[in-house]
Amino acid sequence: MGDLFTDTIVISVLAATIRIATPLILAALGELIAERAGILNLGVEGTMLMAAFAAFIGAYATGSTLMALLLAVLAGMAMSFIMVFMAATLKVEQVVTGLALNLLAAGMSLYLYKAFFAVEGQAMPTVAVMPVAPIPFLSEIPYIGPILFTQKVLTYVALLMVPVVWFFLYRTKYGLEIRCLGENPKAIDTKGMSVSLRQYGAVMAGGALCGLAGAFVTIGSSARFVPDITNGRGWLALVIVIAANWRPSGILIAALVFAFLDALQLQIQGIGVQMPYQIFLALPYVLAIVLMVLKSRRGRSEEPARLGVPYFRGER
Amino acid sequence: MGLRLEPRLAPSARWQAVSVAVALLAALAVSALLLESAGTDVGVAFAAILDGAFGGLRTTAKTLAKATPMILTGLAITVAFRAKVWNIGAEGQLFAGAMASYWLYTLTGPALGMALLPLLFAAGFVGGGLYGGLAGWLRSAFRVNEVLTTVMLNYVILYLLSFLLVGPWRDQSSFYQQSERIDRAAWLPDLWAPGKLHLGFLVAILAAVAIHVVMNRSWFGYEVKAVGLNARAARFKGINVERTAVAVMVLSGGLAGLAGMIQVFGVNHRLESDISLGFGFTGIIIAVLAMLRPGWVVFVAILFGGFENGGIKMQVATGAPSAIVSAIEAITLLFFLTAAALTRFRIVWRST
């Protein structure tokens, strides 16, 4: 009897870990592609927030999950278009641009939500949350089934994107070109290939992934939109990229570590253990700092040499 | 054939002025569209904002009071960004300063009266400075990106505050997460009571003057500028870049901490999460729009203080959410960045 009880808890914590890791994996992979192309996109949080809001609007207006996802992806790409236009074309300081995007998303989503949805004296509008989609047969495997194969479609997409992004970056011509942009953009330019065109492609593809990450935060998890619903997940995605040493497989591991912590916290709160809950909520952010310190002390960094440095033709 | 951007050899002052004006107008136009789309009468809304910001002596005084913490966070960001140290943690440092000064107050009580004030100011500065310095030290000792550490520290301190406000510092008589009210003897004295203008405004102005002098007339200011322009060259010149970065973060965090102390003892009169309305983040916009010049920081912060108060008036007058103000501020920043970049280039037609 006791064993059965602990089994249920372990399975529920691990299943929650995979679920919570979904937006982190998607956003971190998106950021990885941008950073490999030499663009430090600090606007992940804002990009996710706008996409989360767009998904909510889409689901509210059409009732269709597909339309909601499409809108979220478009919002993610629009936000990252601003980022890459300022960074690659205008060569504005990338840190400042990314921050501006976050502030824009916070202000815009709050205003639009209050202007159109939060009508005084009425119930908060809700949308249908994406259903769990168990994979036939696989979901019946003991332990692994309920953990890995009883998730939402976006979670499967996120897990699949890890090898897909790896294959793209390390096994295709375009991936090689993008990685080259982060190390030596001059090499691309000298071959007569457009540096900025590739940066636009990389950053906007990353924005699309961030869009999916944002969609999972609203229609994937919550029936309601609340201001600042992303609550730092975009920032954690940036930390995950560093902790992962700019590798897709590392992103999977780092995202799972953060998600496990969160899942554990939910479980402990659910059982009703007497501990100040604030300690658990602060833990991921403390862990993030610890991870970055540890990361700096060991091994060779895969950080792109030209991360955040604009490319000017004719530079030496 | 197509449009190309070519770098200008020297920025053209004329175009710089023109583009800043265009950026402001463009931001206003977008805001008008946003208001219009929600069915708000744009004319009425803008008039209400202006009236709520600077319509009369008393409203203007309230605007100055609102601007006070933003002057200080704007200065905090100015100091950091001049060295290209990207402090995104002014919000957290503001709370660290507020908590440090409140902690001192719980130890001494209001018995000291006015003699307590300088100590409270010092505690606010030290609290924010230490919290900022922590990120600076992590950057210099471990080469950890300060953008990410300061953001993480923002979250950490808010949870610490929440923990303290439900635990040891809780106001037992209230349902909300807030401390007990501070004794009137320890409040910041009023400069002009009808406009709720308190001593903090004077402190913020003095801080702006001090930062102007330090940044433009002192060896430290020179070092900061050198590190910001070219850290490598600064190192060759014998400047200790790591130490400068830590010092910059301490000064920056200290200024933000002062803002927190001023909010607790001058405005809210208790410790609660409402002491900041995102002033640490607004400070970023203010500093960039002010082109990292302390005098302009004061000007832009007062303008933004007017926006914040005007936004509330607009919400009352039209029903449109006052959140439009944060949207306007961010849009202005984006247009300004674009315009400022364009002045560094000229657009040419190429037929290659």
Image: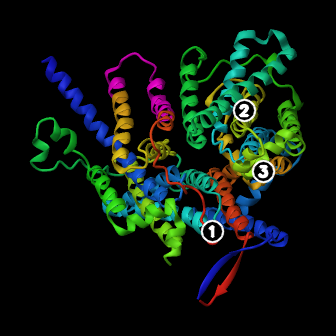
Residue position marked by numbered label 2 in the rendering: B250
Q: Which residue is mark 1?
A: A312
Within-10-Å neighbours for mark 2: few <14, some 14–19, many 20+: many
| Frontmost residue, B213 versus A13 | B213
Q: Same chain, marks 1 and 2?
A: no
Q: Nearer the viewer, mark 1 or mark 3?
A: 1
Q: Secondary structure at mark 1?
A: loop
Picture coordinates of residue B89, whole percent (x, y):
63, 38
Quarter of the image holding residue B138?
A: top right
Gap in Å between the C-alphas at discs 2 and 3?
A: 18 Å
- Determine whether the residue tagged by mark 3 lies in a helix, strand or loop: loop
- Along the viewing direction, whichever of B55 and A57 lies nearer the viewer: A57
Q: Report the chain holding disc 2.
A: B
User: Label 3: few (<14), some or many (≥20) within 10 Å?
Assistant: many
Front in this rendered view, residue B236 or A134? B236
* Residues at circles 2 and 3 in contact by the CB criterion of under 8 Å: no
- Number of callouts: 3
Q: What residue lies at 77% left-to-right and 41% top-to-bottom?
A: B238
- Label 1, label 3: how many angstroms apart (C-alpha)? 25 Å
